[in-house]
């Protein structure tokens, strides 16, 4: 027996002149059937924003009702020195440059101090791949944080950072994660994924670890009981087929491990980097990308709009295109997107401000922990 929601969506779609192909895809979605990669490419190429919004909202409502999550978090970016030279990056600094930094353990302790009296639940750690740092130092950063803030959830190090220090230590990813877990690591972020296509990666980030290696590291984390997020960098020189190939690989790994918490599409920002000549895609394209992601990634419960990258207004709009998480309070603790020209140069929102943003989209704000356990409604 079809649900009331499925009857409503069929009525809406049947009242508009959509192609037989799009209606067939919608029927799969309403029937709780997995769409194919070809279907996802069709959605990108053929569907208008209204159609995508209807389908993405339907999928999101089945998974999350009208709840939108956020958390109270802050970032520590240990360094912007990096052994790699990615063409899209606005973050990298050079040794001796006044705009570069490398934090010692006392620096890490100092950065923690303002947050020790606040109800934050997560610290997010990621940065450049420092040429001289190793796995032991990464472990010391985590253990230092746990000593200072024993109850904080430490979400630390992209697969690109981990690949470098694991190889440097001559350890497998599983062995490396065992050491990090003993130091207090709780989960890992999704950065460094960029885009799956080897051809595109060779042009935008050819020096860093391969896409297959990124997947291997996340699978190893999941096998060690460490959950992670997944990202995709879009809006540069990739096309829709590349985006779908990327998401297909994530969906396949999620079928195998069930270790991903959420998917975060990250928009290319065109300032202070070697791809700036491309410009940036429109907000309409952002919303289309969120919607297709929500429809295609049927085994991901959560889709996140990272508000410091997207901006507050576009993030609010995204809540009507399949998004159910907006990240957190941040408290002006990250420079990655501000250095690339993000709208919010000092990203910070209070819980009341985030709640208001969510409520104005007619959604229900709920504070969560890092693993999406609800803490309290607002």
Image: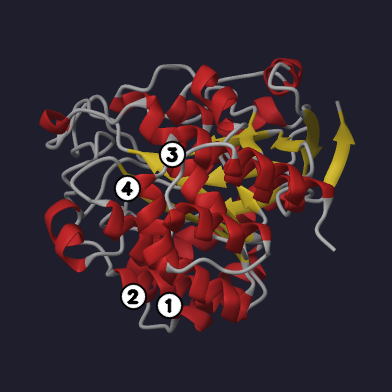
User: In front of the other: label 2 or label 3?
Assistant: 3
| Residue matched to label 3 | 288
**Precedes in sequence: disc 3 or disc 1:** 1
Alpha-carbon distance for marks 4 and 3? Answer: 10 Å
Q: Secondary structure at mark 1?
A: helix
Tell me if 220 is positioned left or right of 341 in this view.
right
- Extreme residue toward the right, this view: 376
Above or below, comparing residue 81 to residue 130 in the picture: above
- Disc assigned to residue 216: 1
Q: Secondary structure at mark 3?
A: helix
User: In front of the other: label 4 or label 2?
Assistant: 4
**Residue at the spot 78% in from the left edge and 30% down from the top edge:** 365
**Precedes in sequence: disc 4 or disc 3:** 4
Colour pattern of the rendering: secondary structure
Residue closest to the eye, 320 or 304 = 320
Tell me if 248 is positioned left or right of 243 in this view.
right
């Amino acid at each position: 027996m079809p649900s009331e929601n499925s009857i409503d969506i069929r009525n809406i779609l049947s009242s508009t002149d959509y192609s037989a192909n799009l209606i067939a895809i919608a029927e799969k979605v309403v029937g709780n059937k997995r769409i194919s990669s070809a279907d996802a490419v069709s959605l990108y190429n053929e569907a208008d924003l209204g159609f995508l919004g209807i389908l993405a909202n339907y999928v999101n409502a089945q998974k999350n009702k009208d709840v939108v999550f956020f958390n109270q978090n802050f970032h520590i970016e240990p360094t912007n020195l990096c052994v790699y030279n990615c063409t899209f990056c606005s973050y990298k600094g050079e040794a001796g440059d006044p705009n570069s930094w490398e934090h010692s353990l006392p620096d890490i302790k100092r950065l923690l101090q303002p947050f020790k009296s606040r109800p934050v639940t997560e610290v997010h750690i990621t940065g450049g791949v420092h040429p001289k740092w190793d796995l032991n130092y990464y472990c010391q950063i985590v253990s230092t944080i746990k000593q200072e803030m024993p109850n904080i959830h430490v979400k630390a190090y992209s697969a690109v950072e981990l690949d470098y220090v694991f190889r440097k230590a001559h350890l497998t990813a599983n062995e490396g994660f065992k050491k990090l877990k003993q130091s207090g690591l709780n989960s890992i972020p999704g950065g460094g994924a960029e885009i799956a296509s080897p051809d595109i990666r060779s042009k935008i980030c050819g020096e860093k670890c391969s896409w297959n290696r990124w997947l291997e590291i996340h699978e190893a984390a999941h096998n060690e009981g460490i959950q992670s997020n997944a990202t995709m960098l879009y809006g540069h020189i990739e096309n829709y087929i590349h985006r779908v190939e990327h998401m297909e690989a994530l969906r396949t790994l999620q079928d195998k491990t069930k270790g991903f918490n959420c998917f975060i599409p990250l928009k290319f920002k065109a300032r202070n980097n070697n791809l700036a000549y491309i410009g940036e895609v429109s907000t309409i394209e952002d919303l289309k990308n969120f919607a297709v992601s929500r429809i295609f990634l049927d085994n991901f419960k959560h889709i996140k709009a990272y508000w410091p990258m997207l901006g507050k207004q576009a993030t609010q709009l995204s809540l009507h295109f399949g998004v159910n998480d907006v990240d957190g309070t941040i408290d002006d603790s990250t420079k990655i997107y501000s250095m690339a020209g993000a709208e919010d140069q000092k990203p910070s929102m209070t819980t009341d401000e985030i709640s208001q943003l969510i409520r104005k989209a007619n959604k229900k704000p709920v504070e969560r922990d890092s693993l999406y356990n609800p803490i309290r409604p607002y």
